[in-house]
Amino acid sequence: MPWRHTVVQFSPIRSGSTLLFNLLREIFPKTSIEKQHTYGWFFDHLKVVSSVRHPFDCIGSIHQAHKKEPTMETVAWASKRFLDNGGSDAVRVKDKDNVLVLRYESFVDDYDVIFDALEGFVGIEISESQRDDLNKRFSRDGVRKIMADKNNFFEWDKETRIHGDHISKRNGQCGYGKEIFTPEQQESIADHCVEYMQAFGYE
């Protein structure tokens, strides 16, 4: 499919990208939705829908997905993984006119935040019936049904790209990174991600 018929879903890893990808492919069924964790120069001519999330929570989610207990070594590894897979690019492109940036903390419990922003960004109308349908199908309970037959994070549904263990025991909650990392580990993450945190107003 030609790139002009493409919408890019670009986000740092573990920041709600799979949710956005699925909402976009349902809202734009005749459009190719490209899910990416790096931003290519040729995206500048396309509509790009992005998300950001507190790096403590993203890096905590990386630990959960890989079943790692936090140490200073794993924190450094996961911080680099986060920055290399979207974190650094998100800072670089956040002010581009073709990029819509959505905050995970704002939309995770209110998908209307996403729908309203898309209506303004793309110039469409998303009906109440479609909003209700997508809210149910891609709620946490809906995602659990999709991932039920997947044994681990590295098994995934090819259509939705939802993994096993996609929703961890933390249930996608906001702020849990500050609970699982020690003050020293939090300081290390903040040092690694200082530009990202400053760019998006995270503390």
Image (tube, rainbow, N blue to C red):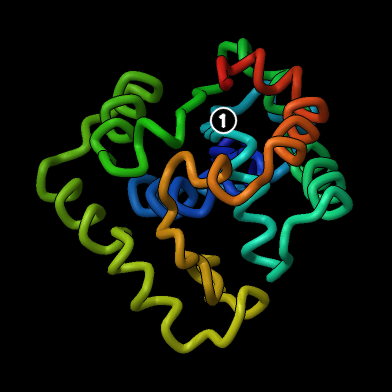
Q: Position of residue 152 (x, y in %)?
A: 60, 81
The structure residue drawn at horizontal position 62% and vertical position 13%, both measured from the top left corner, is 96
Q: Answer whether residue 42 is visible to the viewer in this image.
A: no
The answer to which of 15 and 27 lies nearer the viewer is: 15
The structure residue drawn at horizontal position 46% and vertical position 28%, both measured from the top left corner, is 102
Q: Position of residue 179 (x, y in %)?
A: 54, 46
The answer to which of 200 and 17 lies nearer the viewer is: 200
The structure residue drawn at horizontal position 32% and vertical position 19%, both measured from the top left corner, is 120
* Corner quadrant of residue 161: bottom right
Report crowding for label 1: few under 14, some 14 to 19, many 20 or more residues within 10 A (C-alpha): many
Amino acid type, callout 1: Val
Q: Position of residue 118 (x, y in %)?
A: 35, 29
Tell me if residue 148 comes above or below residue 8 in the rendering: below
Tell me if residue 199 comes above or below residue 166 in the rendering: above
Q: Which residue does the numbered mark 1 point to in the structure image?
A: 48
Q: Is residue 38 left or right of residue 179?
A: right
The structure residue drawn at horizontal position 56% and vertical position 15%, both measured from the top left corner, is 201
Q: Position of residue 59 (x, y in %)?
A: 67, 47
